[in-house]
Amino acid sequence: MPNPWSKLGRWNQVLLALIGAYLALWPFEPLSATVYTVRVILQVLLYVVGCVILARLGYRVIRLLARRFLWRVRHRMMVAYFFVGVAPLALAFVMAAVGAVLLFLPVGAYLVRAQVEERAAGLYAAADSLAWQLRASDAERRRAIGEAFLREAPQRYPGLEARLETGDGPVVYPQGSLQGQLPPALESYRGIVRRNGRYYMAAYALYQPGEPSLLLMFPLTPQYLAGLLPALGRVELGAAPASGSSRFSFRAPAEQTSRSALDAPPVEAHLPPPVHPLDWRVNNWPAPARVLDWSTGTTRLENIFVLQTRPSAVLRVILDQQSPELRSFAGNLSWILAILFAIAVVVSTVVAVSLTRTATSAIHDLYVGTRHVDQGDFSYRVPQRGYSQLTELARSFNRMTASIERLIADSKERQRLESELAIAQEVQAQLFPREAPRLPSFEVLGVCRPARAVSGDFYDYVRLSEHRVALSFGDVAGKGISAALVMAAVHSTLRTQLALMGGKLDDADLSHAAARVTTETNRQLCAGTAPDKYATLFFGAFDERSGSLAYVNAGHLPPVRIRGGEAQRLEVTGMVVGAFTHACYEASTIELQPGDLLVAFTDGLTEPENPYEEQFGEERLVEALTKVAELPLDKIAESVIAEVDDWTGKAPEQQDDMTILIARRLG
């Protein structure tokens, strides 16, 4: 029998447990105050858990109703129009009013800061001009020039304090001010300075120690601040707000009529009148500026100014330089845009309702179509009505169902091709020699890393006799299956020619044999392949008794012989094979001494590009081979291929087949 307790939810179980504990303690409540306290705590927990259960139940009910109501796309679009259109529009009106005010107030603070910086720049220009004049004057006249300036400057800068360095001691104005060591941060400074609790406008013109310099400072008085931006409002030095209070506030534009307001100082005297009922006065809006602390020498941004203004005053200052015609045009344009906006809202509502029906009908048709596709009926076609993107969507759906049938067939064909390609890759892997021929004084190793499933590069080594071995190496033009087939043809032709010569190769002239094998390979390749299918070929025969290597290089990149750290390139002795039937090939002979290293490679190791489209190149490849020439053959191949990979930056796709054949004569 199922347990009813397990069917209850976790919150219901907690609620029943609290109710049980609350009722169980009820008979013992008169016996102990602790029991009463516990029951009060349980009662609070009951309220909390009950509210949580009711909230969860309400959420589930709302979610269920929403699911049933919003199942239809039409209802969803209605809700979407409300949240996208109606709700944001109502919120936009509220935010527009607040945003307009909050947009202009930082601009007003910026105007105050810009005016302060402009005044500081003017003061610095005066100090800098005098400093230049002092440096250009004779040392005997500097003090007199500076004192003359200090006598006239207070008329322009009330409350001025100055310190002049002419090289023979400082001159201060007035006497007793600006004594002692100046803060190092004052060098070439212009701006506001806090000194002894007061704020000054300061400018210090100093270029190099020992040269004439000038420091000018005057206090920021209410009279000076009143002249900063009269049209903007009232600018004052800010005071720290009281604990728990804020300096910033709005005040309606209506004039105060109380007796205390009439007796108060005329704070409104510098404020422009309001232009509309919402043009409220803003009190104590902070206007930050950078301040240099005289005692610590540090500079930081502080809210030392407060601004009393109106949004209309800020706008008026911004547009003050514009023509009356432009201001009139801006006002008329604003009214026109507001009317057009209202018309657009009405029209968009009507259009939205009419388009909703069209959209929901098309979506319903697509829903029916997807049900057919889900059941495997790809022959179903969605009805197409009118001319719109939804109609094009219906056409796309119909094209999709037709394409799915083709994709299924193509997928089966692709699987078949991939299976055949895997077989081709396995067959080609069998063409490469599994192990190198073992000679007492000669070792050889070939490595091929295809760029695709199959490769157009090839290498081979065949033991001709007890003391002779044949080496073949080449690159077929092109990539993919076609190149791999030509590669197989070249490989089989070379093997066939060597098999036909049989035991004659033990005592035959290797130069003649190499030329003959290459010539026959070219003739058969021309006869059995298309004219555009050709290959480069390096074929050589090595005799360990004499140490000579007879080779034919048919258009391939010249292999490298490394001896004693020096690299020598082998010559090209003929054209590519498979292009011209009557091509003639001649062999060359070189001597391999003990320790010599012979390396043949394809362009897959020289032509890879780095991210800057610069090829690796044969010179870098030869340098890389020279550095590791003493290592075992497999380590040499790994090192060279790894260096090419580093050059390309570990590209996700290999650019070409990488094939290398390395041979070394042992001592």
Image: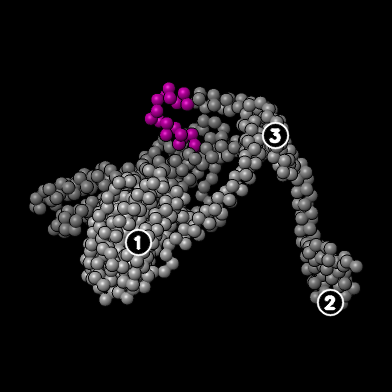
Which one is nearer the viewer's eye here, 630 or 334? Answer: 630
Q: Which residues are magenta?
A: 310-330
Disc 2, SS: loop
Would residue 542 be found to the left or right of residue 131 on screen?
Answer: right
What is the three-letter code of the residue carrying label 1? Met
Q: Main secondary structure of the magenta part?
A: helix
Examine the rendered structure and indicate whether residue 35 appears above or below residue 146.
below
Disc 3, SS: loop
Residue at figure coordinates x 26%, y 47% from the top left:
124
Q: Earlier in the sequence, mark 1 or mark 2?
A: 2
Q: Earlier in the sequence, mark 2 or mark 3?
A: 2
Q: Nearer the viewer, mark 2 or mark 3?
A: 3
Q: Which residue is mark 2?
A: 32
Structural distance between the alpha carbons of marks 1 and 3: 70 Å
What is the three-letter code of the residue carrying label 3? Arg
Q: Which residue is mark 1?
A: 501
Residue 197 in the image, given as x and y percentages of width and height: 38, 57
Q: Which residue is mark 3?
A: 381
Q: Is residue 562 magenta?
A: no
